[in-house]
Image (cartoon, rainbow, N blue to C red):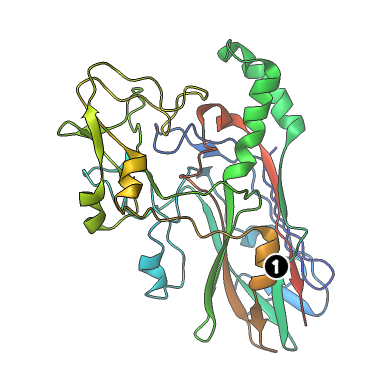
Amino acid sequence: MNRKVLLFYLVMILCLVSSVSVTAAWYVGNRNLYVKDFDIGFNGDKEVKIGTTEEEFYEDIPSSDILEVEGFVPVSSMYSYKWLEQKKTTPEFRQSYSSLTTESEMDSGIAKKGFYSQEFYLYSERNVIVSLAEETKVEPNVKKNLETAKKIKDEYPDLSQDKILDNLNSIANSLRISILVPDENYYSYFIIDPKKDDEKIYFVGRLDNNADGYYDFKAGKERLFGEYEEDDIAKIVYKDENVIDSELSDTTKMASAFNAKTRKGIKAIDWKKTLENGFEPVEEKSLTVEEASNTMLVPLVGLKPQKIIISIYLEGWDLDNTDITRLGSFSADIKFKVLR
């Protein structure tokens, strides 16, 4: 069973638990990540309460007030500056390029589904400051993933059961939590990556959208997808035309939307020389839990409900999204604390 349980305890703590299955790789196919059950409950003390409207607040929100999510697909926070500059009151995520009906390599358009997002109202009788608690974490559901690994091992004859399990457990690595505070005086947006490491996530790259094993191309050249400026197109450097099909971009990893071959007769993008030529890829601006606990400050004015929007999504440009993770399960605890 997939469960999401949000709990407020001490002054205020928010927890989310989710057990899910993930799609193949971003931009490949139409397989969804399905959630069979979506239960969220809240319990709070007398100081801070929460509701889904500005009129009623609870220590324990009725489950009927919590939105259900029928299915998840990887989306992306790329091009977020477009809606942040307008100070929109709900976040916008970009859809996969495989969903496009146009030939655009850049903005893929706004995703309408495939993620969890809901507004909540925090209420206190006195002024307090809320931040993310250090206990916030994301962990793979190892027990459930082991059961899944045993069931699907025949589908991956080249991999051991332990290797399959490792891949299933990696699903938690691409999970993101975003919190929008659409306040006139304190408009702010935070992206938290609980599993963030030293590897940078860029919103740009070559992609194999149709899963044929080759990077997409047009007019004899590979296409570069993602968030970048029109002026940067002239900075893309290509290698000489391939006389034979190339090997996988990374021969140590499985083929995916990110790891494919260059087809014979096509000019491959020379990424190193492209960067040396002044191309500036846009990097995901996410925070670790520790960073968020020190920088995310949400003021609550006494007797005035404070609206926040909490979103849970899978970042499509995270390279941990690979085929074998599609049945992975994870749990995530999102916790807030009151500073004063």
224 to 111, vertically: above or below: above
Binning the other alpha carbons within 10 Å of mark 1 as few (below 14), some (14 to 19) or many (20 upward) gives many
Q: Position of residue 85 (x, y in %)?
A: 38, 74
Q: Position of residue 333 (x, y in %)?
A: 73, 54
Look at the numbered disc 1 and give the secondary structure of its residue: helix
327 to 306, vertically: above or below: above
Residue at x 83%, y 73% (from the top left corner): 45
Front in this rendered view, residue 183 or 42: 183
Q: Which residue is mark 1?
A: 293
Left/right placement of residue 59 relative to residue 313 reads right
Residue at x 77%, y 31% (from the top left corner): 143
| Quadrant of res 139 | top right
Front in this rendered view, residue 121 or 194: 194
Q: Position of residue 282 (x, y in %)?
A: 40, 56
Residue at x 79%, y 70% (from the top left corner): 44
Evaluate whether residue 54 shows in this view: no
User: Looking at numbered disc 1 in the image, what kind of residue is underneath it?
Assistant: Ser
Front in this rendered view, residue 285 or 135: 285
Evaluate whether residue 203 shows in this view: yes
Q: Position of residue 89 (x, y in %)?
A: 46, 73
Left/right placement of residue 87 relative to residue 246 reads right
